[in-house]
Image (tube, helix red, strand yellow):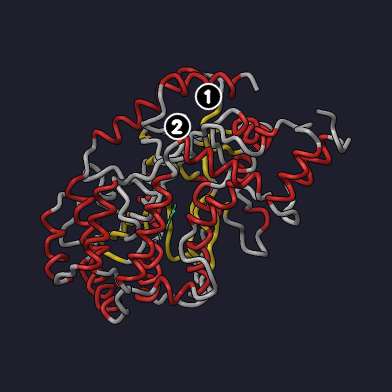
Amino acid sequence: MPRLLEWSPRFILDVCQTKVWTPAAKLLLLLLTNYQLPITHYLLPKIMIPRKRLDIAWSDLFFGIKGCFWQQNREEILNRFKSTKFFDDNNIVCFSVRSGFDLLLQVLALPKGSEILVSAITIRDMTRIIEHHGLVPVPIDLDMQTLSVKTESLESAINENTKAILVAHMFGSRMPLEALLSFAKRHKLLVIEDCAQAYIGYQYKGHPESDVSMFSFGPIKTDTALGGGILRFKERTLLEKVKTRQSGYPIQNRWQFLKRLGKYVILNSLSNPILFGILAAGCRLFGTSHDNLISQALRGFAGSDFFVRIRQQPSYPLLALLERRLKQFDSASIEQRIAVAHTIIELMPNIRLLGEKANNHSYWVFPIQVEQPDNLMRHLWQKGFDATRGASSLYVVKPPAHRHQWRPIEAQETMEKVLYLPVYPGVSVRDLKRLAYIVTHF
Ligand SMILES: Cc1ncc(COP(=O)(O)O)c(C=O)c1O
């Protein structure tokens, strides 16, 4: 069949990627140009291995849904937490890590203008919370090979206004804290350990010398309950104050939690490479990026009423689901994750993995540093691997206006070139080999 329209493939590609044209018009265009660009590019989905698999089973999701309809006593379930190996009298369950951190800062009531040293990479909301309390986050650069804070940066950042250190273990690694803890002791600083990305079960409940350790059970986290955060306190007096403060919060509406469960039933289906491929093809047809769509869907507490949303107590169904997840957690899943990561590391020995020299790494995600991350990401999409650059809205903390010289250079330069690969249990060795081959030959 002759082509009715002789338009350049580039033009057709551009048109198909705009939002102005409706899918029907795009289809017509493809027909008129007699598939000058392969129609499969737009319509036929390719199998695509998703960036990550939610760490939750269907049975857990249905348990959560059941809990929304058959509620029991919240106090009883809170007491039952103590029978899990992870939880004890020094812990509190919050709505999320962000909620717990905000509660902590309310209770501490540090003088306005006090500074908190923050390990250079974290999520934006953590520094937003610090600033909301009239405090100043000061970044501390990271050694990106070990993912640990640089002690020399700590020394140069401290001054008489410094009151605390917020240190986040990144990407599933866990940095040694001894040097940081003795630095904090010398300068009488509170140490807040952010273990949101480092949960591995009861084998690590936070460093015993940290003042506060925080664990997240948000949707993309290990052993997720689609929400919830657990904070462990060294000092019971501080814990009691946080508990009292939290008791004045409204309790999360269970129907809100049901809505969240519904959303994750859909997102969990997308861990199937065929369905995920259909989604990616659909996005191409509508001129949107599946990457943005997924990132937006996974963003928690989006919107202007951020502080109203985080200042809640977890609902009964969220607590029940979290208790179940803690109880049923199997550390073999972490060992499997480590084994998969080691398999692909061996297949691409020259690729720079963030945290390649970390002592403790459980590979919650698999970030690599490459020269052209955007190009490699698109290339991998075409080959059926959903690599991404934007896992969990991480960012590099900016120094206060008058202290530009304290820019965390290593963290900044590394994160500009970061790409997260889909590496987790469930990806076959054959696919890991293919992925390693594509990455090393790009
Ligand atoms: C390093 C870090 N800190 C804090 C948080 C916040 O955890 P939550 O979602 O429980 O508030 C996250 C979540 O992604 C995180 O990655």
Circle 2 residues within 10 Å: few <14, some 14–19, many ≥20? many
Mark 1, other Cα within 10 Å: few <14 / some 14–19 / many ≥20:
many
Q: In which quarter of the image is ligand 1?
A: bottom left
* Residue topped by disc 2: 423
109 sits to left or right of 242 = right
**The one of 162 and 425 positioned closer to us in this rendering:** 425
Label 1 sits on a secondary structure element that is helix
Give the farthest residue toward the right.
6
Nearer-the-camera pick, 247 or 56:
56
The residue sitting at 37% across, 49% down in the picture is 221
Residue most toward the front? Answer: 1
Q: Which quadrant of the structure image shows residue 104?
A: bottom left
Find the distance from the CA under tag 2 to the CA under tag 1: 9 Å
Q: What residue type is labelled 2?
A: Val
Q: Give the percent coordinates (x, y) of residue 88.
A: 16, 58
In this view, 206 is above or below 42: below
Residue at point 66%, 50% (across, down): 286
Q: Which residue lies furthest to the bottom in this view?
A: 248
Q: Where is residue 72 in the image (x, y as percent from the top left)?
A: 15, 70
Q: Name the residue under label 1.
A: 435
**Would residue 368 be seen by someone viewing this image from the given angle?**
yes
Quick check: can you spot residue 175? no
Tell me the amino acid under the disc marked 1. Leu
Q: Quadrant of the N terminus?
A: top right
Answer left or right for 365 relative to 282: left
Which residue is at a point 15% across and 65% down the rendered structure image? 77
Give the percent coordinates (x, y) of residue 315: 27, 69
State if disc 1 and disc 2 touch (CB < 8 Å): yes
Numbered disc total: 2
Height in image: 396 above or below 415? Answer: below
Q: Is residue 179 left or right of residue 283?
A: left
